[in-house]
Image (tube, coloured by chain):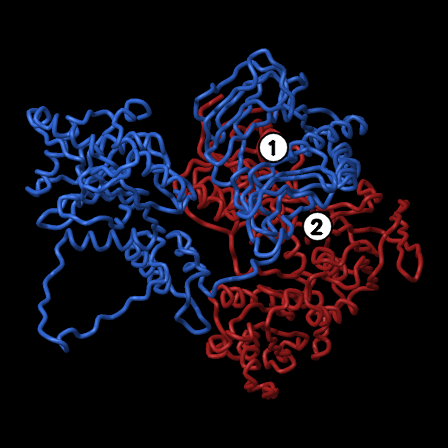
Chain colours: A blue, B red
Amino acid sequence: MALEFKLPELGENIESADVTRVLIKIGEKVEQNQPIVEIETGKATVEVPSEVSGIVDSVKVRVGDKIKIGATLFTYSTAGATLKKAETPKSQKPEISQPAVKKESEPVITTKTQAPGKVEFRLPFLGEGIESGDVTKVLVKPGDNVEFNQSVIELETGKASVEVPSEVSGKVLEVKVQSGAKAAVGDVILIVMGSSSTPVKEVSKPAPALRVESQTKQASETQEERSKMFVPPVLSVTKAGMPDKIAPAAPSVRKFAREIGIDINEVSGSGPSGRISIDDVKLFAKNLNQKIRKEGGLTGGIGIVKETLPDFSKWGDTERTEMMNVRRKTAEHLSYAWSTIPHVTQFDKADITDLEELRKKYSKTVEQAGGKLTVTAILLKVIASALKKFPQFNSSVDMERKEVVYKKYYNIGVAVDTEKGLLVPVIKNVDKKNITELSADLAEISRKAKDKKLTIDDMQGGNFSISNLGGIGGTYFTPIVNSPEVAILGVSRGAMEPKFVNGGFVPRLMLPLSLSYDHRIIDGADAARFIRWVAEALENPFLLNLEG
Amino acid sequence: MSTQKELAVIGGGPGGYVAAFLAADHGMDITLIEKDTNPGGVCLYRGCIPSKALLHVAKLVREAREAEHIGITFGKPVIDLDKLRTFKENVVNKMTGGLGQLSRQRKINYLRGTATFVNSNTVSIEKNDGTTEEMSFKNIIIATGSVPTRIPGISIDSPHVWDSTGALELKEIPENFLVIGGGYIGLELGSVYSALGSKVTVVEMTSGLLPGADGDMVKILEKSLYAAFQRIMLNTKVVALKEEKNGATVTIESDKGREELFFNKVLVSVGRRPVTQGLGLENTGVKINDRGFIIVDEKLQTADPSIYAIGDIVGNPMLAHKASAEGKVAVEAIRGHKVAFEPAAIPAVVFTDPELAWAGVTENEAKEKGLNYEVARFPWAASGRASTLGRNDGLTKLLFDKESQRIIGMGIVGVGAGDMIAEGVLAIEMAANAKDIAMSIHPHPTLSETVMEAAEVFFGESAHLYRPKRK
C-alpha cells in the first residue's frame, strides 16, 4: 500500500500554509531531505524537505492550496513495495491458467494492455470538483508518437494549470482540442493509433501457461503504471466497518438531510438519546437560512454585542419617527463598512491657486456646455488618472475566496447631500470623458439626485467615491470607505494660507484632502503616494497629460 | 457503434440484479450482462441459497438424532444423494427462474455473455452464443463480484480439492473431509458434510474460528462444532498437499510440528477475491487499490465518472445484502440524487447450528476503537422458548453507548439468530435506546424476548435474570 508523507510541524503557531510551488512529480524518485513543496506560512516562505525516500505515487497538493499541518503531501512507495507489486502476477498465475482444465467449450478470455487500432484518449478525472478546464497549450500534433505519461495538453482548471499526461500510447491521428478551447472530463482529447496490433480480446483455446503469464504481467504492469498517474485525492475504499460517527437519526432522516444539503452531524436531535427527527432537520435548515439572511451572507458582526437602548423618556420628552429607507440603508451599509474595513485616513493639502484661476477662466465655456466647472468635476478626472496609476485603489477584496478583484473600468461615485439623506450616484467611465463632459454629467446627476429621479443603475458600479464638503466648510474629516470600494477621498473647503515661497510668505489657496482607505489591500505608503499624486495633479494640471 | 444507451449493469448477482431492477422500476433503459441463464450470481447459483438448502437438511438430520434425548428415536438417516442434489437444484432453479421472469417483466435487456471495457462508456460483449457486440452507455455499473481465493502452492486442479462451488455440487460424501479455513464458508459447508456423515477436520491459521466475531459468542458455537467435527486445529496451516488415488495427503504445520493426514476430499475456503481480471479496466479511468478492490466514493462512483461499482468488488464485507444496498445507492446517484452508502449496521450471519449473527459494532471493535460502551447479555438458559426447543445454547447481547444509552451493536448466537438480527439492525438504524427496546413488547414465548430482556439487563431489571445493576 502506498505510504503517505504528511506536512510536518513547521514551528510554533503555524497551523497552515499556502502552497506556492510543487517540486515533485508523480513517478519521480524522492530522497530524504529533498525539497517537496514551497509554502508560504504568513511568516516566511519555506521549502519543505522530505523525511522519507521512495517513488512518488501521487501528489496530493497543488499550487494555491491551503494545507494544514498533518495534511498528506504525497503518497509514495518504497523499493520494497514496488517489488511486491511486481510479483503479484506470478502468484495469480494458477488462476489465469485455471480455465485450461475447465470444459473445452469455455473459451479463455485474455486481455491486452491496449486496444488495437484507433484509441480515444479522454480527459481523465483530475480531482475533486474539477469538471472542465481551458486548454492553454496543445503539446502534441498529428503524426507525433505519444507514450504513456507523456504530457499532451496543458489545462487551466481555475484551481491550477496542469499538464495532462496521456494514458495511451501510439501515433497521434487526430487532436480533438485546440488551445483556447474548453475541455470537460470525459471529452476526447486525442485519437491515437495504438502501438499494439494484437486484438483487445482474444478467444483462444487453452494456451501455454507461459504465454498467459507474460500477458497478464504486461497487463498488470500497465495497470500499475496507470494507477501511478492519477490517484484521485478524495476517493477511498468503502470500509468494511462503519463510519466512526453515526448520527442518531433514522435512515430516512439521514437521506432527507443529505438531499437538502444539511450535514446531519451538525443537527442536534430533540428526541431521547439525542435522536434526530425530520422536524429537527427542517428546523436546523430554517434557522440556518434565517441566520444567513440576517447576516446578509456576511462574515461580519465581528464580536459586536448589541446594546439595548435606555429609556430616554426618563430624562425628558422624546419623539419616535420611523427611519426612512435611505437613512436605514445608509446606517446598515456604513455599519458594515465600518466593522469590516480596517480604516486609515491620510491627510494632505493641494495648492489650487493656479487651478482656481483656470477654473474661473473656463467656467463660462463649460457653463455653455451645460455643466458647472467645479473642483469636484476636475477631481473626477484627476482621480480616474490616479486609479490607473495606482490600480489597487480600483480594486475590491474578496475575503471569502481570498482574492483581489482588479477592475478595468473607472466609475466614480460622488456623495450628494439630498433632502432624503446621503446619496452616492456614480459617474461611469470617467476616464473616457473630458472635464467638460464630466461637469455636465455631474450637474445632471446632482439634479436627478435632488429631484429623486436617480435609478438603481445610477447608484451602482462605483469603484471609488468622492465626498466634497467644501461647500459647507471644515478642514479635514475621516470619510468611511464605501464598501466594496477600497478608498474614498474627502474634500474640505479651500482656504487662503500663507505659504513660504522663495524666502517669503505668499498667499496660496490650499485645498484640504482626506483619503480614507482599506488597509487590508492598501498600505500607508501607497496611500500617501496616491494622495500626493492627486495633490500634485491639482497643483500642476499638466501632470494629467504627462502621466495620467 | 450504435448510439449511447442509458445504463448497463455488468454482473447479475444480488448487487447487479437489484440495481438493474430498481433502475428499470424508475423507467430507465437497462442492459444486464451476465454469463448465467438467469440473474442470481454466486448467491443464488453457488452460494447463499444452495448452501442454506443443504444446511436445512443438516439441521433436520441433527434434530432427528437429538430427538432421542426427549424420547423419540428415529432410525439412522439414509441419504439419497441424487435426490438431495435435485432438491438443492430445484431450489436454485426456482429462485433464479423467478428472477429471470422478473427481469423480463421489467423489460430489461438481459444479455448472456461477458463484458470487457473498450473505454469509459463502451463495452465489448462476448456473448454466450459466440457473437460479439460493442455497446455504449451513459453509465455502467460494475457488479462482477468475487471468486474463491486459492492457497499458493496447493493446486485446485485436483479432483480431490474443492472450493465452495465444488463442495456445493454435492458429488459425493467423502469419508474424511478436510476444511481449510475456519471462516463462515468453511464452517457452514463443514456442518453440511458432517451432518451427511463425513468426518470433518477444520484447519485454521489464526488462533480462533470466525476471526472478527466476538469470542463469547464464538465459544457457544464452538461447543457444538467440537461435538460435530472430528477435529478443529487452530494456529495451524497447510503446507503441502499430495494427490493420491482416493484423496490427498495433506501436510499441516503448527507450533507442535508437522503432521501428515489423509483426506478423501479437501475444501479450500480461505476467502474470496474480487473479479477484475479481464474486465478491461485499463481502458477506463477506474482505479483499483492494492488488494484488488475497485476504489469508489460514498456514492459508489469510481474514479471514472461514468462508471460505478458495487458489491464484493468494492470491498468487505462480501455479503449479498451489502451489494444490494449499494446497488440501490448507485442507481439513485446515477438518477441524480444526493445519496451515500452510509449504513449504521450491516448484519452478518453464520448459518451454522446454532447460528451466529451480529450487526453494528462488535465488542471487539468497540474495544479497539475505545468506545464508551456497555454490554448487556441475556443467556438463553433463562429463555423459556429456548428450553422448549432444547436449545439453551444461545446468547443475546446488546452494546450500548454508555452516555446516550443508544444501541450501537447486537450479537446473537443461537437457533434462528440470523432472522432475529434484523431487529438489531432496525434498532441501530433508528437510533433506538435501551429504554425503547426494553419497552417494546416482545411476544411470549419466543426467542425474540431475549432482545427485550437483554435491554432490561442493561437497567438491572430483567424479570428472568437476576443481575442487579451495580451503583
Chain ID for label 1?
B
What residue occupies the far top of the structure in this picture? A143
- At horizontal 46% and vertical 73% (from top left) the residue drawn is A273
- At horizontal 34% and vertical 64% (from top left) the residue drawn is A279
Q: State the image coordinates of residue A235 (x, y, percent, origin top left).
A: 56, 44
Q: CA distance from mark 1 to mark 2?
A: 24 Å
Q: Is residue B401 visible?
A: yes
Nearest the viewer among B419 and A393 is A393
Three-letter code for the amino acid on which mark 2 is drawn: Leu
- Numbered mark located on residue B114 in the image: 1
Three-letter code for the amino acid on which mark 1 is drawn: Thr
Question: Quarter of the image containing the C terminus of chain B?
Answer: bottom right
Check disc 1: other Cα within 10 Å, few if <14, some if 14-19, many if 20+.
many
The reply to the same-chain question for discs 1 and 2 is yes
Question: What residue did someone put label 2 on?
Answer: B168
Q: State the image coordinates of residue A255 (x, y, percent, origin top left).
A: 42, 55
Mark nearer the N terminus (1 vs 2): 1
Check disc 2: other Cα within 10 Å, few if <14, some if 14-19, many if 20+.
some
Comparing marks 1 and 2, which lies closer to the viewer? 1
> Secondary structure under badge 2?
helix
What residue occupies the far front of the structure in this picture? A503
Q: State the image coordinates of residue B235 (x, y, percent, origin top left).
A: 83, 61
